[in-house]
Amino acid sequence: MDCECNETSWRKDLLKNCIRNSNKIVYTPKSSIRHPVRMLYDMSKDLFAGRELAWRLAVRDISAQYRQTALGLLWAFILPIANTIIWIFLSSYGIVNLRDTDLPYPIYVFSGTMIWAIFMDAVNAPLQQTMASKQMLAKINFPREALVLSGIYQTLFNGTIKVVLLFMVLLLSALVPLKINQGWVFSPGWGLICFPFGILLLVLAGTAFGLLLTPVGILYTDIGKSLPLFMQFLMYLTPVVFPMVDIFKFNPVTPLILTTRDWLTGTTPEYLGYFMIVNSFVIVLLLAVWIIYRVAMPILIERMSA
Amino acid sequence: MSETLITVEDVSKKFCRNLKRSLWYGMKDLGSEIIGRSGHNDGKLRKYEFYAVQDVSFQVRRGEFLGLIGRNGAGKTTLLRMLNGLIKPDKGRIEMQGRVGALIALGAGFNPILTGRENIYVNAAVLGLSKKEVDNKFDEIIEFAELGEFIDAPVQSYSSGMAVRLGFAVTTAMEPDILLLDEVLAVGDEGFQKKCFNRMGELIKRGVAILFVSHNMHAIASFSSKVVVMADGRHREYNDVSAGIKEYRRRFANNGNREVERFCSGNDFITFHDIEIRTKALRPGDSFEANLLYDAKIDYLDAEVDLVIRTSHEVSYHFQATNKAYKKVIDLKKERKSLYIRIKDIRVNNATGDIHIAVWSHHREELLFWCRMPLEFYGVDHATGNTFLNVSFEVR
C-alpha cells in the first residue's frame, strides 16, 4: 500500500516537473521575431488562452456600456440612422444631386451606412480596447490577444443588433410597398447565406487596419484624433452614400462593402474576384499586424507608464 | 537544495526623463524590434536616459521569501514588472519557472461598474484561471475577502482596502509557484494584514517562492529568508536579514537636515556659547551626554529644560520630557558655568534621528536656547526591532 502511494506521488512529481519545465519563461532583450517558429507557437497558444478572457472582457464591456445609458441598445444604431436620415433629406430635396442607384436610394444609403458602421467599429476597436486597458496592461501579464479578440466580439455583438434592425427595415419595406421603394421588392436569394460571412470578413479587415495603427496610436494620440476624420473621408470614397463611380474601385474597402450589400439584397455580386483578392491580402495583413502588436506591447507598456 | 524558481542575471532597464524623447525612443525601439535587431541600443544610454535598474542579479528558490526593500524610486517596481514580463529588460536575462501570480497593483482589471462577484470572474480570467477553477475556488475567495453583502455591489462603492482584499484573495487562490507582491498590504487594515501574512506563511510551506516589496520592516524582518536592498537601480543581497534592514535604514541617514541647527543661543543677559557632546552615535544601552556652556549676567532660577528625541522608524520612536518630569529644579546662576545633561540607557536600535534641546526661563516665559542635532543609533546584530531591551539568558 505504502509502495503504491509512493509510486503515484513519484509519478505526480514527474508530471509536475514536466509541466513546470514547459512552464519556464525566459525574458531577454532579444527581439522574439528572431525565433519565428517559437513565436507562432506562442501566438496560437496565447490566442487560445486568451479566448476565455476575451469573452469575459467583452461581456464586461457590453454590460457596462449599456448599464449607464438611458437609450441602451439604441446607441448601436443611432449614428447610422441619423446619417441615413440626413442623406435621404439631402437627396430628396435635391441639395445634392445623386445618380440613380440600382436599389431605391433610401435602402441603398441605409444598408450602406449600417454596413459601414460595422466596419468603422472594427477599425476603432483595437486602439480603443488597448487604450482603455492601459492600466491593466501596465500591471498584469495576460494574453494581449484577448484585447483584440474582445474588440472583435464586441463589434460582432453590436453588428448583430445593426443587422437585425436592417433586416426588420428591409422586411417592412417588402410588406408595406412604399412609394419610396419605386417598385423594388426585397427578395434575398442564396447569397443571404454568404452575408454573415461577408460581415465577418469586413470585421476582420477593419480589425487588421485598426491593429496596424494601434502601436503608433498608443505612443502618439494624434492617430486616435485624426482617425474619425480619415474614416469620414474614406466613407465618401466608398459606395456607401454615393452611388458607385469608377474612382471608388481604387479603394480596397469598396468590394467588401459592395459584395456584402449585394449578398444581403439579393443582387449578384459584381466584384467577387476583387473581393477575394482583397480578403486574401487582409488575412496576410492581419497575421503581420498581429505579430507587430505582440512584439510592440512590452515597448509600448514601458512608454505608457513612463 | 530546492529548485530555483526565479533567476535574475545582470538585468538592467533604462528609462527616459523627457516625455517627448521617450515617445520617440519608443518609436525607434519599435522599429528595431520589428526588424528583429536585438538589444535596445546595446544597453548604452541615450540622451535623457538613466538606469532605473542596473546589473541586478539574484535567485529565489522554492519556499524562499525574498524581501525587496529600498527607497521610493529605487527600481523595485520596475524590477517586478520585468519579472512579470510586462516590460523587457534592456540587458541581462530573467528566468521564471512555473505559474506566476503577481499583485503589482491591486484592483487592476476591476471594472467599477460591475459587481465584486462579476469582477472576480473577470480578474481571475486575467490571471489565467478558467471559469471552472474559479467556480471551485469561489467560496474560498469570498470568505477570504470578507466582503459580505458588498460582493454583489458595484466595485466603485468599495473602499481601497476592500479592493485590495478582493485582489489578494483572487491572486493567492490561483495557486501560483511564484508570487510577486508589491506593497500590497499598505492599504489593508490590521486584521486583514495578519490574515495575509498567515496566507503567505502557508504558501511558503507549500513551496511557493515569494518576492515581497514593502516598507514595513517588521513584516520584512519576520518573513524574509533573505533581503535585497535597492538604491538608485543597484542592488545588494543580504542573507542576514537584519544586516539588510540596517543597510536600508542607513540609506535614510542623509535624509532631512543632518546639520546642527541652532535657533536661539541666548539674549542680552545670558549666552550659550558652546555645546559639547560626547558622541552622536549610540548603541542600544549607551547614554547621551551633552554639556551646555553658558555665560549669564543675571540668575535664571527654576529654568526648564526640554528634551526631544525623534527617530526615523516607521513607527517613530519619540521621547519628550522636561526636567519637571524628573522633579529636578535647575537654577542657572550668574557666572560662567555649564549645564550638564545625560540621558541614560537609550534603547533605540538601528535608526537615525535627532535630538532637540531647549532651555526656557521660569514658567517658559522666554526661550533662552534651542538647538537640534542629528543622532545615529547603531543596530545590534540579530535584532531588527526599533527598540532594544536588555534581556539576560541563562541555560540551567
Image (cartoon, coloured by chain):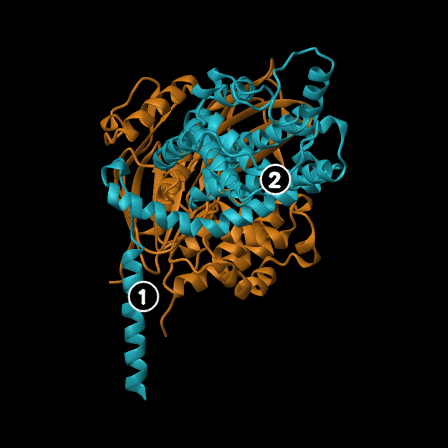
Chain colours: A cyan, B orange
**Image quarter hosting the C terminus of chain B:** bottom left
- In the image, B215 versus A31, the foreground residue is A31
How far from the left and from the top, in percent, is residue A202? 49, 35
Q: Chain of mark 1?
A: A
Q: Is residue B131 above or below residue B307?
A: below
Look at the numbered disc 2 and give the secondary structure of its residue: helix
In the image, which disc is placed on residue B239?
none
Identity of the residue furthest to the bottom in this view: A1
The spot of residue A81 in percent (x, y) is: 69, 29
Q: Disc 2 marks which residue? A: A158
Picture residue at 74% right of the left edge, 13% below the top: A93
Q: Amino acid at mark 1?
A: Lys
Q: Quadrant of residue B110?
A: top right
Q: Nearer the viewer, residue B120 or B106?
A: B120
Residue B389 in the image: x percent, y percent?
A: 46, 54
Q: Nearer the viewer, residue A273 or A214?
A: A273
Image position of B284 with respect to A208: above or below: below
* Quadrant of the rendered image containing residue B378: top left
Chain ID of residue with mark 2: A
Q: Residues within 10 Å of mark 2 (few under 14, many from 20)?
A: some
Is A164 left or right of A300, judged from the image as shown?
right
